[in-house]
Image (spheres, grey):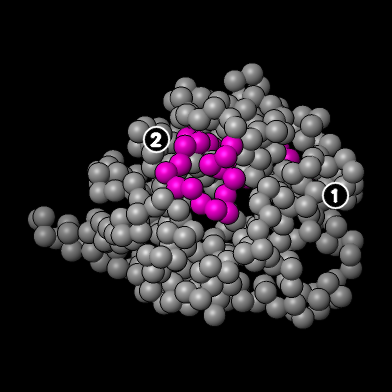
Amino acid sequence: MKNIKFLYKLTVYNILIVLMSVRHVLFEIFHRWHSFKKIKLLIKKTFPKRIFDYFQKKKIEKLLKFPEAFSIETVNICNAKCWFCPQPEHVRTKGYMHFDVYKKIIDEISINKKSVKSIALFMDGEPSLHKELIKFLIYAKERKIKNIYLSSNMEFFNEKLINQIFENKLEGTLKYVIASLDGVSETTHQNNRIGVDTKKAYQNTLLLLNKRKENLSIYPWVFPRMLVNDTNKHEEKEFYSYWKNKSDKVLTTFMHNWGGQIDDELIHSNDNNPFSSICYFPFSQCFIQLDGSVRICCLDVNGTQVFGDIKKNSIKEIWNNSNFKELRKNLINNDRDNLPELCKDCTYPQKGQWTLPFFWQQGF
């Protein structure tokens, strides 16, 4: 009887793997199509501007009812000291999100979960350092939330944590993990992920993939990611080749200047084919710090632009308060003088929407 159940589960697993492969191919085709400038220009010329304006208006109206994406800062401590990140120098009190704060956030998200596409349990820190990470995921599972993801440098994403994910059947709640591995060689990786043990990071990423296979699960998806810059661009193709047959998707992306907080000639921008000139964060994504305060975006590591506190107001109330309304108006009107300093020279909108990593790849 046990053998029959196992064979049945294995058959279903293999069918799902095939279906997921087809899905990946379709996403890839769409990504390639979406990047063709001539096709996009043809569509723009074919359809009147008023049609685009109408659909844009309807989309914004929907987004303003409740955020479609969240970043929840479970911890703002990190084991890495990356040269391209202002996190190590941030002046806010370092610590961990209390479960009661997290619970309040998840409870409101669960009521509006049909509107929410993704929830990041990280922001200014390494999520695997939070000792209650599994407890957080279990609570989200109990509230029937299935679209959480993590981004980790993978040094502490160890066997104990991985086993707990599968033992608690959290693979449906935790949809994917972005493995931030910015090099193939130890030298290149450590020149970027400063302070991170390269061997452990790679071993843990491979272990997560192997454990998932052992448990006949398709989740969490694993996306190794490289932030391309002048120190590692010579390994970009090698990085892609190493991971393409091991992981679900290899992500390579342009870097940004963290809202002008990073000014380094090693950073590659996407000036030739920018995704957008208007920041989409205040229209789509809510960023909650570990104390429950809501800031304008993930780049504001020092919390200079805080627009609310979920301990005092609901997410929905904060999302539609006067501060957010003013920011959105100034972005749409390109009113640079009235934008926060963080927004004036920010290159993040050029990168593309980060909550859909299938499209977050330069390709070869």
The tag on residue 332 is 1
Q: Is residue 335 left or right of residue 67?
A: right
Residue at 70 percent across and 78 percent down: it is 36
Distance Cα–Cα, label 2 vs label 1: 38 Å
Residue at 45 percent across and 47 percent down: it is 80
Magenta span: chief secondary structure: loop
Q: Quadrant of the C terminus?
A: bottom right
What x and y, as percent, mark residue 98?
46, 25
Q: Are marks 2 and 1 in contact (CB under 8 Å)?
A: no
Q: Quadrant of the N terminus?
A: bottom left
Labels in figure, total: 2
Nearer to us in this view, 243 or 232? 232
Chain-order first, disc 2 or disc 1: 2
Residue at 86 percent across and 44 percent down: it is 330
Q: Is residue 32 left or right of residue 80?
A: right
Picture layout, residue 178 above or below residue 133: below
Picture layout, residue 305 above or below residue 234: above
Picture layout, residue 121 above or below residue 27: above
What x and y, as percent, mark residue 299?
64, 45
Residue 88 shown in magenta: yes
Residue 9 seen in the figure: no
Range of residues picked out in magenta: 61-90
The tag on residue 354 is none
Amino acid at pointer 1: Ile
Nearer to us in this view, 115 or 243? 243
Q: Is residue 41 left or right of residue 356?
A: right
Q: Residue 189, located in which quarter of the rendered image? A: bottom left
What x and y, as percent, mark residue 176?
43, 54
- In the picture of the structure, the residue carrying the numbered disc 2 is 130
Nearer to us in this view, 315 or 269? 269
**Between tags 2 and 1, which lies in front?**
2
